[in-house]
Each structure stands twice: as structure tokens, then as C-alpha cells.
Image: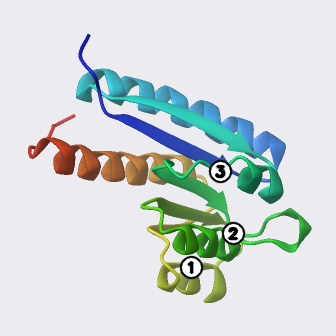
Amino acid sequence: MKHYPHFKIVILEDNDFYNRLMTKHLKNHIARSALLKRFTFDITSFTSYNDCIRNFDNETDIVLTDYYLNDGYSALHLLDLIKNRGIECKVIVLSQIQNITTSICTLLEGAYEFIPKTKTAFGKSWEMIEDIIDQKLHKRHGKFHLS
């Protein structure tokens, strides 16, 4: 059996409804892409920063996180953790609140992208995840797969 590249994706969103919606949306889109581009994936979602950190796998490729999290945590805490562990993980930050702290600061701290939580957030999240997967597939195979 051929071994396909595997991608681990984490969603950290403390709003349970939005978390489930985002997880379902991304699973559907990524599943189609995985068939075409020949990779496997799993998505793990958390509604609590502490649960996410307790279960965080250093092999995680992509994290999609809300900026403001419960219990006073933010995406900056997650970015610090990833940086301190030396993990090659891309972090996409979403937030309803768009200001210098949520957008520019997260990018300066190493976030891959900042996405405002608007009606286009799901589509933009999927596009960013697809870009990251394409870059990693390109790096692993030395060629680019078209979707």
C-alpha cells in the first residue's frame, strides 16, 4: 500500500457551535482535496486552550484558532508555545475583533494568516489551509499538484 503524506490539523475555538460548524466545513472541503492530491488528514477540535495544550501533538501541521480564548488566553499564547517547542506548524488566527493587536501583532508573532470572522471566514480558512498543504506537498514531492 502506498504511503500518502498525512496532515494533522487542530481547530481551537471556544464557541462550541462555531467550532462544530468550522470543523464540519473544513472536513468536507479537505476530504475532496485529499482524494485529488493524494494525502490523508485528521482534524482535532478543542473548545478550551488548556485541553488543546494538554493534547497538543508536536506533529501538528496546521492550527486554526480564535484570537480571544476562554480563561484569558489568546492566540499569542499558542504561538509562543509552538515557537518554544520549535514546531513547524502554521497558525491561522480568526477574530471578530479586528485591531492592531489581533491582526498585526499575531502576524508579527509568527501567525501564517489573520482572518476576520465575517461571512467569508470559512472560505478564506479553507483557502489558507489548502495553500499550506500545497506548499508542504510541493516540498515533499518536489512537484506541484494542481487541484
Residue at left 31%, top 33%? 5
Residue at left 59%, top 72%? 79
Q: Is residue 71 visible?
A: yes
Q: Secondary structure at mark 1?
A: helix
Which one is nearer the viewer's eye here, 38 or 118? 38
Q: Amino acid at mark 2?
A: Tyr
Q: Secondary structure at mark 3?
A: loop
Q: Residues within 10 Å of mark 1 (few under 14, many from 20)?
A: many
Query: Which residue was labeled with disc 2?
Result: 67
State the separation of the CA atoms marked 1 and 2. 9 Å
User: Does 39 sit above or below residue 131?
Assistant: above
Residue at left 27%, top 49%? 136
Q: Amino acid at mark 1?
A: Thr
Query: Which residue was labeled with disc 3?
Result: 56
Answer with left or right where residue 8 lies relative to residue 34: right
User: Does 123 sit above or below residue 33?
Assistant: below
> Is mark 1 in CB contact (under 8 Å) with mark 2?
yes
Q: Amino acid at mark 3?
A: Phe
User: Does 35 sit above or below residue 49?
Assistant: above
Identify the image quadrant of residue 63.
Answer: bottom right
Query: Which residue was labeled with disc 1?
Result: 106
Among numbered discs 2 and 3, the one appearing first in the sequence: 3
Which one is nearer the viewer's eye here, 128 or 3? 3
| Farthest top residue in view | 1
Which one is nearer the viewer's eye here, 123 or 40? 40
What quarter of the picture does the N terminus occupy?
top left
Identify the image quadrant of residue 6.
Answer: top left
Give how far across and how far down residue 109 sits, in percent: 53, 82
Residue at left 53%, top 30%? 27
Give how far across and how far down residue 85 sits, in percent: 55, 67
User: Does 76 sit above or below residue 19?
Assistant: below
Q: Nearer the viewer, mark 1 or mark 3?
A: 3
